[in-house]
Amino acid sequence: MKSYVTISLGCKVNSYEVSALVSRLKELGYVENNINPTVAIINTCSVTSTADQKSRQHIRKLITNYPNSIVAVMGCYSQGQHEFIAKEIRPNIVTGTSNRDKLVDLIENYQAGNTIDITDNSPRLFDKYEELGITNHSENVRAYLKIQDGCDNFCSYCLIPFRRGKARSRSHQNILKEANYLVESGYKEIVLTGIHVGGYGKDLENESFSSLVQDIVDIKDLYRLRISSIEESEIDEKLIELINTRNNLANHFHIPLQSGSDTVLKRMNRKYNKEQFFNKISEIKKACPNVALTTDVIVGFPGESEDEFLESYEFIKKCGFNMLHVFPFSSREGTLASRMPNHVDPKIKKERTLKLIELSNSLWEEYTNQFVGKEVEVLIEQYDEKNHLNIGHTSNYIEVKIQDFENNVGKIVKTIYKK
């Protein structure tokens, strides 16, 4: 019997893409088998140098563990290093972040011999979204829905535009078709994902991200739609109105800041300044007082002085974020930032990272305290049999644990929130 095993490294977009290919393999009669599979597929990551290293290690591990299997490699790391992978590591099939729609056919028709490398060397030539078909990638009751690929921002620290190509939006029709399929399949929450989610529709006529969101939240029986991440400039009045008026649009925005210093933002080639960012945050908070606001922050960007770090620290507090995802700067060869002078000492980066993590913990504690003793509505996502706990999240992404001897995964439960 034909069978498969998969590994996905990095982001939810990678997980989604692997799941889409698995859906196609299943249609052809493949079953999951991690002992002696016909094919082993890995979707690689290249967001940091550590991700590159993990990708190399996992490819080699697949070849060692499954010597009789067809090993197929794809993703961001293989997009930039496909020649090295083909010549030095020698899996059976290599592609990057294009031609993945051909991968299943290549697997089906593979004949033992030299490594097949079908990676497109010119990712900026990508002109349309690569449709991999409907998938049901999920975490229990939560399903991910990819709506676009690529990015045109070219932040000075990021390799992704070079590895994923220009921004391409998926067709509105195919997105709604998959969203309806997911709801009909019983998934309670859909998370919109992509490389630059809020940029959806900019390459299409008469399309916008907020219009897409409106059409999805209109789907009958969809309990919750969540936006994975969105830039401040892409949160328009329509989206704010939707999050304030539609009960099934999650009361949560994840808005990347990266730095609260204008001089650092300029070096990062971000498309906003502090004033613009703060005005947008203030607008959102005024319209949606209880909304959860989370963000990404990069620590130790080249040339970041102590004053710039403190400026960023104070700005984060001023914005009133509720949680921070903190990332120490990772230099990526090929980016503008890698060639900048005055890289920050690793010890200082670590100290600053810990300060921001401590701030994040304090901000989240303060935010969640306001809900203690109040009734909250929770979508149960998993059950801890050992401790008899139903675990899930509220609309504003507060994790709630409910003591119960009954497994309520997939159910919506109202409870009094306590820590």
Image (cartoon, rainbow, N blue to C red):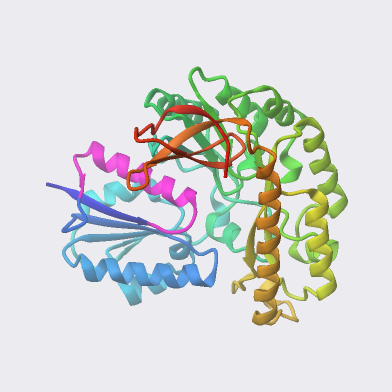
Residue 265 image position (x, y, % from top left): 79, 61
Q: Main secondary structure of the magenta part?
A: helix
- Residue shown at 66% from the left, 50% from the top: 365
Q: Which residue does the image show at 52% across and 72% down from the upper left?
A: 49
In this rendered view, identify the residue nearer to me: 50 or 56.
50
Above or below: residue 273 compared with residue 228: below
**Residue 164, horizontal then vertical, whole percent:** 54, 55
| 329 or 60, nearer to the observer | 329
In the image, residue 397 sits, relative to residue 52, either above or below, namely above
Q: Is residue 284 magenta?
A: no
> Who is closer to the viewer here, 299 or 361?
361
User: Do we see residue 147 in this rendering?
Assistant: no
Task: Examine the rendered structure and indicate whether residue 405 appears above or below residue 153.
Answer: above
Is residue 386 among the parts visible in the rendering? Answer: yes
Front residue of this view, candidates 220 and 339: 220
Taking the magenta stretch, the answer to whether it contains residue 26 is yes
> How many numbered marks, from 0 up?
0
Instruction: From this view, report whether residue 193 is shown above or below residue 217.
Output: below
Q: Position of residue 91 (x, y in %)?
A: 29, 67
Horizontal side of residue 321 vs 181, given as left or right: right
Residue at x-position 53% and y-position 60%:
163
Query: Which residue is located at x 20 percent, y 52 percent?
Result: 33
Q: Quadrant location of the C terminus?
A: top right
Q: Which residues are magenta?
A: 8-32
Question: Relative to residue 196, is residue 73 drawn left or right?
Answer: left
Place of residue 413 in the rendered image (x, y in percent of width and height, measured from the top left): 48, 28
